Image (cartoon, rainbow, N blue to C red):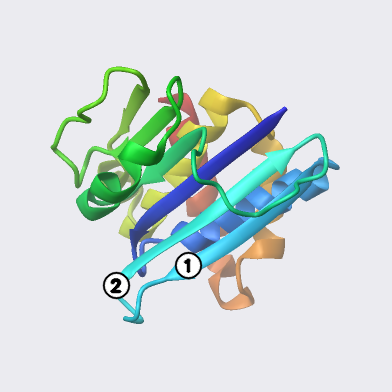
Amino acid sequence: MKEEVIMAGFGGQGVMSIGKLLSYAGMKESKEVSWMPSYGPEMRGGTANCTVIVSDKKIPSPLSSKPDSIIVMNLPSLDKFAPKVKSGGTIFVNSSLISKEVERDDVEVVKIPANKIANELGNNKAANMAMLGAYIAKKEIVSLDTVKNSLENVLPERRHGLIPINEKALAKGNEI
């Protein structure tokens, strides 16, 4: 098993957090992992993405030119990364913010109303967790329980009060 995923969005949408969370969960399950962040020049509102690789075998390079999947939180990320997904791969789209259809017929598209889910739970910052929950359900590379149990280790202490809502968002995304 080897899964390469790029997670992308605007700075502040939590793509780095879900990348770290997926990587940490993979480590807890004794898998090989790689997490490589990439930031745009702006601190908030600029582009941000990370590449995560989870594998049963050693990972020779943290780069991914043809990822198996992408998780895109906004339209610029969809436009940039959709062409890179390998044929037969999966594109996870935040349908709350992206109404554009994916213009490829050789990939599977999974639409998640992430911001809607987060708002219904009472915190729009949990949209990233809804996306990760859906990704975990579809790809089954780590368990949802491992991800939930990793929240305390990955999130900064000042964000520990948000763990219950993040757990709910993960579960809701996982259901969808």
Q: Nearer the viewer, residue 133 or 11?
A: 11
Q: Residue 69 appears at what percent x and percent y?
A: 47, 35
Label 2 crowd bin: few (<14), some (14–19), many (20+), radius 10 Å: few
Residue type, label 2: Gly
Label 1, label 2: how far apart the Cα atoms are: 11 Å
Q: Which of the labelled discs sits on residue 38, or is there none?
A: 1
Q: Residue at x 55, y 67 (%)?
A: 161
Quarter of the image with the C terminus in it: top left
Q: Residue at x 66, y 63 (%)?
A: 154
Residue 78 against residue 87 in the figure, above or below: below
Q: Judging from the image, what secondary structure is the residue with disc 1 in? A: strand
Residue 82 against residue 122 in the figure, above or below: above
| Left or right for 164, reference 115 | right
Q: Residue at x 48, y 47 (%)?
A: 6
Rendered image quadrant of residue 85? top left
Q: Residue 54 appears at what percent x and percent y?
A: 69, 41
Q: Residue 9 appears at what percent x and percent y?
A: 34, 57
Q: Residue at x 27, y 18 (%)?
A: 105
Q: Which of the labelled discs sits on residue 46, or is there none?
A: 2
Q: Are marks 1 and 2 in contact (CB under 8 Å)?
A: no
Q: Which of the labelled discs sits on residue 91, or is there none?
A: none
Label 1 crowd bin: few (<14), some (14–19), many (20+), radius 10 Å: few
| Left or right for 21, reference 68 | right
Quarter of the image with the N terminus in it: top right
Tell me if I can see residue 166 in this picture: yes
Residue 39 against residue 173 in the figure, above or below: below
Q: Nearer the viewer, residue 122 or 116?
A: 116
Number of labels in the image equals 2
Residue type, label 1: Ser
Q: Judging from the image, what secondary structure is the residue with disc 2 in? A: loop
Q: Nearer the viewer, residue 47 or 63?
A: 63
Q: Residue 28 appears at what percent x and percent y?
A: 81, 47
